[in-house]
Image (spheres, grey):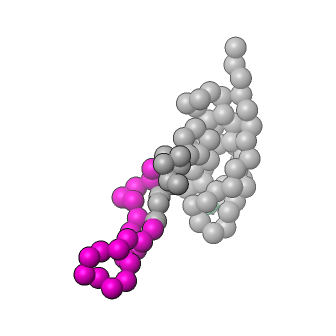
Amino acid sequence: MCHSEKLTLTCVCCPVGCELEVERTSASQATYLSGAGCARGKRYGPAEAISPQRVVTTTVFVPGVATPLPVKTAGPVPRELAG
Ligand code: SF4
């Protein structure tokens, strides 16, 4: 049996925030349908529907440095680990 679900997602790749339409056909497959203003959103939509990921930014205290330093993950991590 094939179960598909249409999702509406907001692209967070840039401040424009395009509203994307995506069809998820299984836990591991999704297809971009419409709404993206650029190719980045067309990639983001299906990826977000299957496995949401985020780059994490924060600040850390370093011994000997008066103010916290900004840091971020080397790449996207699963959203459930991003806090
Ligand atoms: S689809 Fe492109 S233009 Fe639209 S929010 Fe995403 S990155 Fe920005």
- 56 over 6 or under it: above or below: below
Which of the four quarters of the rendered structure image does ligand 1 lie in?
A: bottom right
Q: Where is residue 14 in the image (x, y as percent from the top left)?
A: 59, 66
- What secondary structure is the stretch in magenta mostly built from? loop
Q: Which residue lies furthest to the front in this view?
A: 63
Q: Quadrant of residue 49?
A: top right
| Total numbered circles | 0
Q: Residue furthest bottom?
A: 66
Give the residue at x 64% y 56%: 11
Q: Quadrant of residue 23?
A: top right
Which residue is at the front of the view, 47 or 82?
Answer: 82
Which residue is at the front of the view, 26 or 70?
Answer: 70
Q: Can residue 39 be seen in this view?
A: no
Q: Give the range drawn in magenta.
A: 58-77
Q: Position of residue 77 (x, y in %)?
A: 45, 50
Q: Is residue 36 magenta?
A: no
Quadrant showing the N terminus: top right
Which residue is at the front of the view, 53 or 13?
Answer: 53
Q: Position of residue 4 (x, y in %)?
A: 71, 28
Q: Is residue 66 magenta?
A: yes
Q: 62 left or right of 1? A: left
Q: 67 left or right of 16? A: left
Give the residue at x 37% y 71%: 60
Give the residue at x 53% y 46%: 80
Q: Where is residue 50 in the image (x, y as percent from the top left)?
A: 58, 38
Give the residue at x 47% y 58%: 55
